Image (cartoon, rainbow, N blue to C red):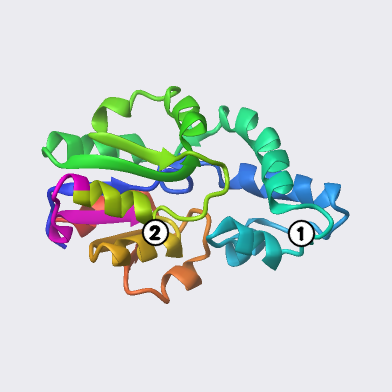
Amino acid sequence: MKMNKQIVWDWNGTLFNDVDLCVESINYLLTLQHLPRLSNKEAYQKVFRFPIIDYYQAIGFDFTKCSFDELAIEYMEYYQPRSLACSLYEHAQESLQYFHDKGVRQILLSASKEAYLMNQLKQFSICDMFEQILALDNIHAYSKAELALNYMKKHAASSKDFIFIGDSVHDYEVAQAVNASCILIANGHEHKERLQKTNAIVVDHIGEVKNMIT
């Protein structure tokens, strides 16, 4: 894959290592609702998906007993303060620096609420490596495709100039929506077997990404 002019990075599970906390957080919510907990990280990775409302339904939440909005608020009240103790993945910062030094424009595209994302980001010295940081105005994590499409229209950008890098099938779907290339990293929120069913390049950790781009 040739080094394109712009890389669009996902945040959670790609650069930001919050998967264990997300397993803990969803199990907290399942316990509150008297539902079976997920047994381990692999079980979580096999059921996680976008939009998040579909993931919640898949693991047994009954929205007639507790609405998705209520569950999302409870989840974020547990997750967000604890997320400030999470770290970047090993090789994440050096990968960002590598492409920054090569003059590649980097964009951060997240399904997180913007205020929450910025609180997480400010712990690390990486904000100046991103030309733009794009996030949602809510906590429901429905889709990032509209953000990506709006960015490309605003900047009159060509899809051939972009590589999307993420850890979920949704990241591939967003790349497909704008007709861009995609690399998926298989140590984030979704299981490797599901990622391999897409047409994206799949690697095991972020340190391999720069070897995929020449």
Q: Nearer the viewer, residue 140 or 26?
A: 140
28 on left or right of 155 = right
| Residue carrying label 2 | 171
Percent x, y for residue 1? 16, 63
Q: Between label 2 and label 1, give the one nearer the viewer.
A: 1
The amino acid beneath tag 1 is Phe
| Disc 2 to disc 1, C-alpha distance | 26 Å
Q: Is residue 42 visible?
A: no
Question: In the displayed structure, would residue 214 be above or below residue 130?
Answer: below
Indicate whether residue 161 is drawn in magenta: yes
Q: Is residue 27 visible?
A: yes
Please report the bounds of the magenta region as a residue range: 154-165
Residue at figure coordinates x 60%, y 66% from the top left = 46
Question: In the displayed structure, would residue 129 be above or below residue 9?
Answer: above
Residue at figure coordinates x 32%, y 68% from the top left = 200
Is disc 2 placed on a helix, strand or loop? helix
| Residue carrying label 1 | 63
Percent x, y for residue 185? 39, 57
Percent x, y for residue 105? 17, 40
The amino acid beneath tag 2 is Asp
Q: Quadrant of residue 170?
A: bottom left
